[in-house]
Image (cartoon, rainbow, N blue to C red):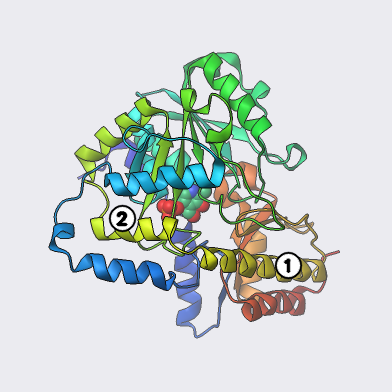
Amino acid sequence: MIENHAMQNLPPYLFARIEKKIEEAREKGIDIINLGIGDPDQPTPKNIIDKMAEAIYDPANHQYPSSVGLLAYRQSVADWYKRRFDVELDAKTEVVSLLGSKEGVAHISFCYLNKGDINLVPAPGYPVYGIGTLLAGGESHIMPLKEENNYLPILEDIPSETARQAKLMFINYPNNPTGAVADIRFFSRVIEFARNYDILVCHDAAYTELCYDGFKPPSFLEAPGAKDVGIEINSLSKPYNMTGWRIGWAAGNAAAIEVLGRFKSNVDSGVFQAIQYAGIEALEGPQDSLKRMQELYQERRDIALEGLEKIGLEIAPPKGTFYLWVPVPAGYNSSDFAEAVLEKAHVVITPGLGYGEHGEGYFRITLTVDQSRLAEAFDRIYAAFGSFK
Ligand SMILES: Cc1ncc(COP(=O)(O)O)c(C=O)c1O
């Protein structure tokens, strides 16, 4: 049987291809250092696991959850927004639980795009923005993120005819893969644009809690008028090392939250309740583990910056995310470079081309391996290639 048109155009997920290469190398007995995928290496904090252990024994938690999430969980998200950003949210109408932010990012396209409708998608960017669009039958209009613009899209470059056909726009700060951050002024410009063209903005805020040097990334919802035009999607995956648990939320514009909740009630039936109680503990319990994670990633970031300097590839220190976005050395494209580094140094890096043509010329490294392995990765690259300067 032939799969449908959208599935035929669906590439294998970027990291599935990289995993295959790693597996092949490991089968040959090679010790690989993987600076590819952004999956925290540290365990989920104990207070969260303990809460899960308690909740899992309660039979009331074994039944279908509410597809939009327990009110207690949604309230804890609303309270967290008030504490963290001074943003008021109505837990009943302005928050919906998600099975991780990836789920909401993919499904919002199904809620807002009819066949041929345009989604304004940043590139390089998290691949699911474009993939959700493709599966929903929409079309991506790429907003290039360039170093000279601090990896912010230039809204004036979007042709007005395209903007008129657009129904959705994704933005993501702190940004994967570039590590760039945005301020309220930028969010305000996005809000004005969205208002002019009647577009729903979806801010992917998965990295707001991974930040360095005292910088506190803002929420899109802090910008005046944000709730009129947009939602913010966030998750417990990265700040609390809960990638496997699958829990997040969307918050903001009540009409969009209702539509997403209605979609979910027909598709996935929500997050296992015991996990929602663990999520409440993550948001409301002691935050010392988050502080330790921020310090750990900052230490690793500095090791990586030193390592990059050693191999002659210097970049400005990112203020957020656990990614470094680095120009490839002269004479390589990103795929050739990633392949050479894997072959000669047995280190996995992500070629920028994996994030689309606008990622070409760069590679991404992830700070989710321990400090000694991270330092060793750069020693290996130096031993294999010397300095690229
Ligand atoms: C920008 C961005 N958004 C969303 C996600 C998805 O995270 P999760 O579904 O675990 O919340 C990721 C994961 O790497 C990401 O980088």
Q: Which residue is mark 2?
A: 276
Could you classify mark 2 by the number of other residues whose Cα lies within 10 Å: few (under 14), some (14-19), or many (20 or more)? many
Evaluate whether residue 9 shows in this view. Answer: no
Which numbered dot is residue 164? Answer: none
Answer with the quarter of the image where residue 369 lies. bottom right
Between 161 and 283, the one nearer to me in the picture: 283
Between 279 and 64, the one nearer to me in the picture: 279
Ligand 1 near label 2 (Cβ, under 8 Å)? no
Answer with the quarter of the image where residue 56 lies. bottom left
Looking at the rendered structure, the secondary structure element under dot 2 is: helix
Looking at the rendered structure, the secondary structure element under dot 1 is: helix
Between 76 and 94, the one nearer to me in the picture: 76
Quadrant containing the N terminus is top left
Query: Residue at 68% across / 70% down in the picture?
Result: 299
Could you classify mark 1 by the number of other residues whose Cα lies within 10 Å: few (under 14), some (14-19), or many (20 or more)? some
**Tag 2: residue type?**
Gln
Query: Residue at 33% across / 72% down in the picture?
Result: 50
Q: Which residue is mark 1?
A: 302
- Above or below, 355 against 342 in this view is above
Query: Residue at 59% across / 40% down in the picture?
Result: 123
Q: Position of residue 278 (x, y in %)?
A: 34, 61
In the displayed structure, does residue 10 sit left or right of residue 195? left
Query: Residue at 27% across / 41% down in the picture?
Result: 68
Give me the C-alpha separation between circle 1 and circle 2. 35 Å
Answer with the quarter of the image where residue 104 lies. top left
Between discs 1 and 2, the one toward the N terminus: 2
Q: Position of residue 89 (x, y in %)?
A: 43, 35
In the displayed structure, does residue 182 sit left or right of residue 55? right
**Tag 1: residue type?**
Asp
- Above or below, 230 against 78 in this view is above
- Above or below, 84 against 39 in this view is above
